[in-house]
Image (cartoon, helix red, strand yellow):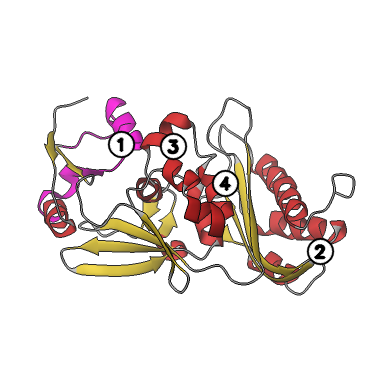
Amino acid sequence: MHDFEFLEPRTVAEASRMLADLGDECRVMAGGTALLLAMRQRMVAPSHVVSALRLDGMWGINFDPQQGLRIGALVRHAELARADVVRQHYPTLAAMAAQVANPQVRNQGTLGGNLCYADPATDPPGCLMAHGAQVVLGSARGERTLSIEEFLVDYYVTALEPDELLVAIRVPPPQPGADGRYTRFLRTAAEHRPLASVSLVVRRDGALCREARLVVGASVPVPGRLARAEEFLRGRTVDPMVAAEAADIVAAEIDPISDNRGTADFRRDMVRIACRRTIADLFGLTGEET
């Protein structure tokens, strides 16, 4: 690891000006789990590291029944998993956060850092997208808000401008009848990064699905909603045949990546299975039926 200068701004505006002045020679550090690994492996060698840890307004978890959930970008995954307000109003988010990577990463890595890294094989982006979440981006020029879909541009690429930081994540208030599930598939028990993930948030009356937001991640370059499957589920009474057909629609709609962790065909099959199981679990279908 090369020597670098460690900067500790106290405001988002101050940090933004540092980023604008230093350009490609600097990197922002939140929890540091991804950045420090990249620096040790000489993948990046910044002359300056701008720490976000002392910035105002980037900590804490707050809930308002009208406004929904606000998660500071520096909130760690373990904090999100155990927060009472998240467990009560957004149990699917809490369950997802409890599975991220491993205990070391969950206790050090931040939600904002995870989103900015834009690793396709990680858990939060797809689950947040299924919940209709937005990100708040700040700079010396002010703030702007983007949906998760707008923020995640491509494989390891986001819509962050060079002088911007991710300040917070906002999640809309849950609607009546809301329910959800998050499912991840690991190639082996020793792996920490999912090969496929499915996030499903619905409004339902028993077995009747009134509305669905279904997102596939990890097997695709960028997590994305599956519009055809969502429309198929809307207004249907979900039984094993409906769950299986929805999963087939999802598998046909995605364009999975192929790499040394799994071929495109293998990933497609795993997404199909994970999707069917997610729908079945959410609607209380038994193992024998699915």
Q: Which residue corresponds to the image point at 53% horizontal and 36% vertical from the top-left?
A: 193
Q: What is the C-alpha distance between the residues marked 1 and 4? A: 23 Å
Residue 265 in the image, given as x and y percentages of width and height: 69, 43
Residue identifier under label 3: 106
- Residue type at tag 1: Gly
Q: Earlier in the sequence, mark 3 or mark 4?
A: 4
Residue identifier under label 4: 95
Q: What is the C-alpha distance between the residues marked 1 and 2? A: 43 Å
The disc label shown at residue 32, or none = 1
Residue situated in front as seen by the camera: 174 or 184:
174
Q: Earlier in the sequence, mark 4 or mark 2?
A: 4
Residue 173 in the image, given as x and y percentages of width and height: 51, 69
User: Quadrant of the image for the N terminus?
Assistant: top left
Give the left or right position of residue 62, taking residue 128 as reference: left
The disc label shown at residue 238, or none = 2
**Mark 3 vs 4: CB contact within 8 A:** no
